[in-house]
Image (tube, grey):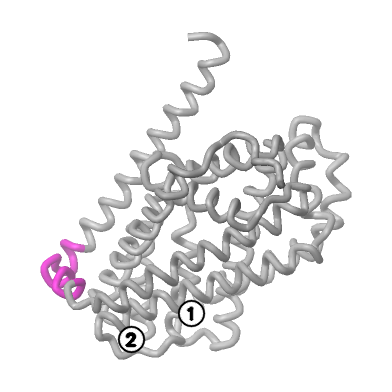
Amino acid sequence: MTAAERPAEMLAGHSYRGFVLRAGLSVAIILFLLWRYDARSIFRILGRENPGYFVATVALFIAGHVIAAYRWQLLAAIVGIHGSFMEFVAIYFIGFFTNLFVPGLIAGDAARVVYLGRRHGRMGGALASIAANRAYGLLGLFWFAAAMVYVFNGGGLATSVTRPILWIGWSSLGLHIASPWLATLIPATPRPMRRAIELIAPYLSHPIKIIPPLVLSIALQASRSVSQWLLALGLGLHVAARPFLLVVPIASVFASLPVSLAGLGVREAVYLVLFEMVGVDRKDAVALGLLYFAVTMLAGLTGALAFVTTRQGPAPAPN
């Protein structure tokens, strides 16, 4: 093995070990919840799901990823990468599909960087656009969660849950407003760090241009809440949409932490605690989390078509 190959081998090893640890934690949490709340009862609840509602949820989830692809297209244009909407949709779904089968926290994002960077000859810009897409997606999640807590005055959730969400929302808003000032500090950073930060400087320097992507991020989070409300209706639960507008984004904040496999286990545990606060049975909450994981897996398979039809080489020249 050459000296150049050793770091890649070590990185791959860490990626697989991290994947095994996250998958192990997810499985352990799910097995504990099934044991603690009677697996047969939970499976009976899952069997009640109306297929029509389930299919509608999958369709809404896929539509959400189309929104995310359009957000990525807008963010890529800020760093000078201009492609068609369908190109960004195809590559975005390739990343979605890759996450199902390739171990690692950022496997899908890495695939998107490779496809977009090679097609446009801009690997650095592609990496910056993906980092921005991830960052502003989380920013929209934080703001939506905080806004729902504020609008519904906590909605019956404990202050130990709502207070940190409000703090994260206000803090992230302050950082976004201060981003032009933060961009002026880039020349003062150490050289290795500066070269990386300079990739995202266009986003920090132009917060107004980020408003449309942020609006799309908030719309995406709203669709995620509605999709899980549809799953609950499919289970025959007579619940209003408001608890889902509160609980789902908060649970998504925890599920976004890189400690489990696609949020599996963490989401169900958070659902169990938070949904009980708003009157949903614990077993129903666990079933909802498992159903949503199934939705994400099925939706991810839709990226197979894009995976086999989209090439990595330079984008074809316009006619």
Question: Residue at the location (34% across, 56% down)?
Answer: 297
Locate residue 29: give its quadrant: bottom left
* Position above or below: 235 against 111: below
Foreground residue among 305 and 134? 305
Q: Where in the figure is residue 242, as x and y percent of width and height? A: 46, 87
Residue that numbered label 2 is attached to: 279
Secondary structure that dominates the magenta span: helix
> Residue 35 colored magenta?
yes
| Crowd tier of the residue under label 2, counting other residues whose Cα lies within 10 Å: few below 14, some 14–19, many 20 or above | few
Question: Residue at the location (23% across, 63% down)?
Answer: 33
Magenta highlight range: 34-46
As shown in the figure, which amino acid type bears the numbered disc 2?
Gly
Question: Residue at the location (38% across, 73% down)?
Answer: 57
Foreground residue among 297 and 39? 297
As shown in the figure, which amino acid type bears the numbered disc 1?
Leu
Residue that numbered label 1 is attached to: 246
Q: Which residue reaches farthest front?
A: 319
Q: Where in the figure is residue 291, as x and y percent of width and height? A: 29, 67
Number of callouts: 2
SS state under label 2: loop
Locate residue 316: give its quadrant: top right
* Position above or below: 232 against 206: below
* Position above or below: 7 against 258: above
Foreground residue among 111 and 291? 111
Q: Where in the figure is residue 260, as x and y percent of width and height? A: 39, 51
